[in-house]
Structures are given as C-alpha cells and as structure tokens.
Amino acid sequence: MMRSALLSISLLGSVLLASGLGQKAAAFEMRSYTTGKELLTVCSGDRDSCYMYVYGVLDIIMLNDDSTKTCSFNSEGVAGDKAVSTVLSYLQSHPDRMDWSAAALVQNAIRSKFPCAKQKSTDKKSPDETIDLTP
C-alpha cells in the first residue's frame, strides 16, 4: 500500500506538466520518480496498485483537459480493464521506452488507443503525439 501511495504522489507533478505544457511532438525532459519499468513491475505484481496509478494519471489528465478546454483522449471508451490492459500492452510493445516517465507512457498509451472523437478548436495536441519524459 505504501508503494501505491508513493506512485500516486509521484504522478501528480509529472502528469500536470506533461498534459499542461502543450508541447508539440518534440520531446522535453523532465524528472520522474516512476519509470515505465517500475510501473510494469508494479502492474505485474499488484494489480490494485496498477489500477490506482493508471486511473490516477487519467483523472489528472481529465482535470487538466477540463481546465484548459482540451481533449487528450476519449474518456467514453476507457473503463474497467480497458485502460490497464492498454497500458500494459503499450509498455510491453515499447521496451525501448521503459526509462521514460510512467505517467507519460500511460498518457501515450491511452491517447493512441482512445483518441478524441473530434479535436476542440483550442486543442493544439494530436492524439498520436508521443510525449517523452525521459528522466
């Protein structure tokens, strides 16, 4: 449970910066306390902590989207096992990105699988952009 709390806390700053900066496809560097490798390890051993982390990231992205009137992913299709399964599949199919920020990898996975139905006019991000938050 302590690991879960630490994972949840570490994602707060990462996701707010990742989703709020509005960067183009060019990567920007940012420190991250949790990497993709660590997230994959947690998800392989503790499904509840995995769910909490993934849905914590998604909650923060949606909070940011609401405040900035943007769309990062289609939240209508993301429910239950879909988000976690999507993230696990993404992590396993991108072993070269395991040192990236776990929060950025969650966002990339969900955005690629559940793109916005229609981009809002104020949204400059495309759903297939990859955010690299290499520590």
Image: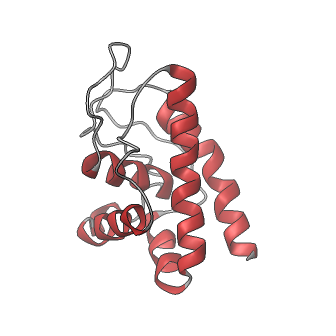
Residue positioned 52% across, 21% down in the render? 68
Relative placement, left or right, of 78 versus 103 is: left
In percent of width and height, residue 30 lies at: 52, 43
Residue closest to the far top: 121
What colour-coding does the image apply?
Answer: secondary structure
Residue positioned 51% across, 60% down in the render? 54
The quadrant in which residue 96 appears is bottom left
User: In the rendered picture of this protein, how many numbered marks are placed on residues?
Assistant: 0
The quadrant in which residue 100 appears is bottom left
In percent of width and height, residue 14 lies at: 57, 45
Relative placement, left or right, of 94 versus 7 is: left
Rendered view: 57 above or below 123: below
Residue closest to the far bottom: 45
Residue positioned 27% across, 41% down in the render? 115
In percent of width and height, residue 64 lies at: 55, 31
Residue closest to the far right: 2
Looking at this view, is 18 or 54 the one in front? 54
Rendered view: 1 above or below 55: below
Residue positioned 76% across, 74% down in the render? 2
Residue closest to the far front: 76
In percent of width and height, residue 4 lies at: 67, 70
Rendered view: 8 above or below 29: below
Quarter placement of the N terminus: bottom right
